[in-house]
Image (cartoon, helix red, strand yellow):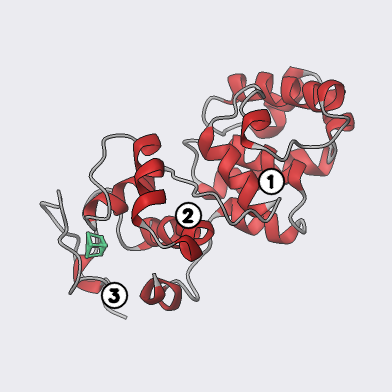
Amino acid sequence: MRRLAKAIDGLDEPAVEKIARDQKEDPFQVLIATMLSAQTKDAVTASASSRLFRVARTPGSMAKLSEARIEELIYPVSFYRNKAVHVKDTCRQILTRFGGRVPTTMEELLTLPGVGRKTANLVLILAHASRKNICVDTHVHRISNRLGWVQTRTPDETEHALYLAAPRRFWPLINLYLVTWGQNVCRPVYPLCPQCVLVDICPRIGVTKVGKLVKG
Ligand code: SF4
């Protein structure tokens, strides 16, 4: 993790991390951006979030938008129709059940439509400054297994295994470090092992082909 901390300096950070920083860790915007980011490229998440937040930045104003209008604003994120339904419903529930504030516990966050453990963990880490959560997406799941930190089949299993395998001080940072590394070096196919700062300590479990060295 210490090597990765140095190595990611200067690389593009994940879209939701950037949105969280730009919006001063606003829990509502972190929640909505994370919902939009599922199975969507970072550039698409960033532009869709910014279009949506230009029109509505609070649960109250977003709940007033029609699903069709939300769809139009967030297109082309993956599953934009489902996500528009979930975004509107989530806004309504935040207003009616939580007094207009994004919940601060895993249990409550998981009751919101379209919110799973990945989204809930990221909101707790980025918007509520939790040091007790690990957010696992496909990058974290893949790289943790390649490195041999865990031996798991699903992101949920990886999350629970990492609580046992990773030192507690790194829990809130694992997502930032591994997602950034996964987008730039330890890619899903053809990871750039020859350029990786972990190559001498990584058992590269499951890696059969590596990408070409990029000069410069
Ligand atoms: S050495 Fe290869 S498999 Fe291991 S972390 Fe680096 S890029 Fe990923």
Crowding at dot 1, Cα within 10 Å, few <14 / some 14-19 / many 20+, comes out as many
Q: Amino acid at mark 3?
A: Val
SS at mark 3 in the image: loop
SS at mark 2 in the image: helix
Q: Which residue is mark 2?
A: 175
**Which residue corresponds to the image point at 84% horizontal and 37% vertical from the top-left?**
56
Image mark for residue 30: 1
Whether residue 61 appears in this view of the structure is yes
Report the front residue among 174 and 71.
Answer: 174
Q: Which residue is mark 3?
A: 197
Percent position of residue 53, x then y: 78, 42
Position of 214 with respect to 91 (left or right) is left
**Which residue corresponds to the image point at 52% horizontal and 35% vertical from the top-left?**
117
How many numbered marks are there? 3
Where ligand 1 lies, by quadrant?
A: bottom left
Quadrant of the frame with the N terminus:
bottom left
Percent position of residue 158, x then y: 35, 42
Report the front residue among 210 and 150.
Answer: 150
